[in-house]
Image (spheres, rainbow, N blue to C red):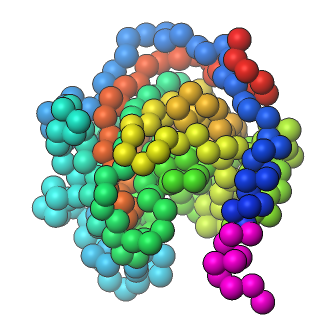
């Protein structure tokens, strides 16, 4: 039987080999803004955002504990706050206590751009795992309704090695995308591909996620730019200018999910966010194989 390190090395080698066979994707027909841009972070405070904290011990998050989540508490001021990073204001997410920071706006049909950067902090139970956070969109419903910690939403994953992966957050949420089988991944072994078959990912189900097409993240310590294009119940995830995911048929309880709030996660790793700007659009860009033109 293979040891753990040998098995992980085998998976890494398999993933690298598969990546070499995937042609690059390009973004074309990028839509122009149909109205004025709106900054979701004023650089001074978090008055337009609402914090919520999960369990005092994050290791309880997926165990349906009898304990109550922390919810609205002064501790949130330590987990989410405004700081100056690299000479500019940023939202600091501590990560030690898991939770969410939800903007008070309700948005549809937009292009959202933000930058993020990892800080050095890593906390239990993920202190030895890839740093993890998330940009959640079309957020709605009660705070903490998902695992006591997050609002229902569709997640643009922010986790090293999986930036742009789609995760339906909440058992009521589902999305459709195109995917191929990739044995190098954890179950459900699905990776987005424009040439793949239609698959449905559903919160709390066996097919709970679809991995991003490729890894376009910059080295640790550098700022990364995320672009999220959403029109109706369809979306495109872009990492540092590289399209990595298309989703469609976003649903909540089987009904089209076309609008909601923007939500940032705290999930075990220090993270900085800045330049969070949203502008209205009326069409999505096209994701194609090959260089942009």
Residue 3 part of the magenta segment: yes
- Does residue 193 appear left or right of residue 169 in this picture? right
* Quarter occupied by the N terminus: bottom right
How many numbered markers are drawn? Answer: 0
Q: Is residue 66 visible?
A: yes
* Residue 106 lies in quadrant: top left
Q: Position of residue 95 (x, y in %)?
A: 32, 61
Magenta stretch, main secondary structure class: helix
Q: Position of residue 204 (x, y in %)?
A: 61, 67
- Does residue 23 appear left or right of residue 114 in this picture? right
Q: Position of residue 212 (x, y in %)?
A: 66, 47
Q: Is residue 154 visible?
A: no
Q: Position of residue 143 (x, y in %)?
A: 36, 57
Residue 68 part of the magenta segment: no
- Does residue 61 appear left or right of residue 165 in this picture? left
Question: At x 49% / y 41%, what residue is drawn?
Answer: 218
Question: At x 56% / y 27%, what residue is drawn?
Answer: 241
Question: At x 39% / y 40%, what residue is drawn?
Answer: 222
Image height check: is 23 above or below 272?
above
* Quarter occupied by the C terminus: top right
Question: At x 40% / y 76%, what residue is drawn?
Answer: 125
Which residue lies most toward the bottom here? 1
Query: What's the magenta region?
Result: 1-10
Q: Nearer the viewer, residue 220 or 284?
A: 220
- Does residue 164 appear left or right of residue 96 in this picture? right
């Amino acid at each position: 039987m293979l040891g753990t390190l040998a098995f992980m090395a085998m998976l890494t080698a398999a993933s690298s080999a598969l990546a070499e066979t995937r042609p690059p994707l390009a973004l074309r027909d990028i839509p122009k803004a149909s109205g004025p841009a709106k900054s979701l972070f004023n650089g001074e405070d978090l008055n337009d955002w609402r914090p919520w904290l999960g369990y005092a011990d994050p290791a309880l998050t997926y165990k349906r504990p009898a304990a109550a989540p922390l919810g609205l508490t002064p501790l949130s001021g330590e987990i989410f706050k405004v700081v100056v990073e690299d000479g500019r204001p940023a939202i600091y997410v501590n990560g030690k206590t898991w939770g969410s920071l939800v903007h008070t706006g309700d948005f549809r049909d937009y292009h959202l751009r933000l930058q993020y950067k990892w800080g050095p902090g890593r906390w239990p139970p993920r202190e030895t795992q890839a740093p993890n956070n998330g940009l959640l969109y079309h957020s709605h419903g009660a705070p903490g309704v998902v695992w006591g910690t997050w609002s229902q939403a569709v997640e643009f994953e922010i986790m090293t090695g999986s930036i742009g992966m789609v995760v339906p957050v909440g058992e009521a949420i589902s999305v459709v995308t195109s995917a191929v089988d990739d044995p190098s991944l954890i179950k459900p072994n699905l990776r987005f591909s424009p040439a793949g078959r239609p698959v449905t990912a559903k919160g709390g189900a066996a097919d709970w996620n679809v991995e991003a097409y490729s890894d376009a993240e910059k080295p640790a310590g550098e700022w990364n730019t995320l672009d999220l294009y959403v029109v109706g119940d369809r979306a495109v995830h872009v990492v540092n200018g590289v399209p990595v995911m298309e989703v469609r048929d976003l649903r909540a309880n089987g009904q089209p999910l076309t609008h909601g709030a923007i939500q940032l996660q705290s999930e075990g790793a220090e993270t900085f966010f800045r330049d969070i700007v949203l502008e209205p659009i009326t069409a999505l860009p096209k994701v194609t194989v090959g260089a942009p033109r």
